[in-house]
Image (cartoon, grey):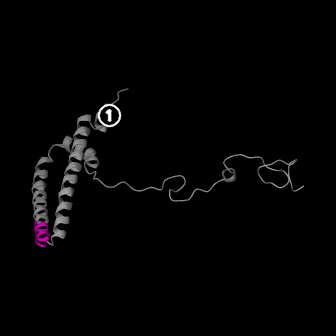
Amino acid sequence: MQTSHNTNKLFTPLVDLRSERKEVINERKLYGELWEVARDIIQKAVRFQRHDVLKKLQNLLTEIQEDVVANDSNNDGEETCSTSNNENTEDDKENAPLAEVSLQNPKRHKPKGRPKNSKWIKRSEELKPAKRQNQCGNCGEYGHYRPRCSKK
């Protein structure tokens, strides 16, 4: 009885996971820095009514989109040359879902328990006075017992 040891292909190596984490962290840092600069630019452009900033940002966006299209066309040519090695393509197929992970905001869920804005509904025990006094058995008033009650 011989078992094949293909378990190594099932698990992603630790080095790959670390490099993916570093890439995600670097993407988040870059996103934060870009967002900070973009927010400052937008606020100052609105404050000083600079309409030329919008045109510059639109030109920058079209330039970046053209670069992405050019890089995609170059990568398509390189991918046709690199598909000759079958082992690499199998590994790429296994790791492709991990590489396509994009950053998104987490989905909101309804928390359990009492809502934060609702008023606290007191129980009957909480409605009684804080300091316990003598309660009359006849009239139900506080401050005296039944033998001293004036309403006999």
Circle 1 crowding by C-alpha within 10 Å: few under 14, some 14–19, many from 20? few
Q: Residue at x 13, y 59 (%)?
A: 68
Q: Position of residue 106 (x, y in %)?
A: 36, 54
Q: Residue at x 22, y 53 (%)?
A: 32
Q: Position of residue 91 (x, y in %)?
A: 23, 42
Q: Most extreme residue toward the top, as rendered?
A: 1
Q: Residue at x 35, y 29 (%)?
A: 3
Q: Is residue 59 above or below residue 76?
A: below
| Residue 6 seen by the camera | no
Q: Is residue 85 above or below residue 122?
A: above
Nearer the observer, 44 or 80: 44
Q: How many numbered dots are placed on residues in this image?
A: 1
Q: Is residue 48 above or below residue 17?
A: below
Q: Is residue 115 above or below residue 25?
A: below
Position of residue 123 in the picture relative to residue 39 (left or right): right
Quarter-of-image position of residue 61? bottom left
Report the residue marked by disc 1.
7
Is residue 56 in the magenta section? yes
> Please, what is the dominant secondary structure of the magenta stretch?
helix
Is residue 52 in the magenta section? yes
Nearer the observer, 93 or 17: 17
Nearer the observer, 107 or 16: 107
| Residue 71 seen by the camera | yes
Position of residue 50 in the picture relative to residue 142 (left or right): left
> Callout 1: helix, strand or loop?
helix
Which residues make up the magenta segment? 50-59
Position of residue 13 in the picture relative to residue 142 (left or right): left
Nearer the observer, 124 or 66: 124
Q: Position of residue 9 (x, y in %)?
A: 28, 37
Classify the position of the C terminus by image quarter. Answer: bottom right
Three-letter code for the amino acid on which mark 1 is drawn = Thr
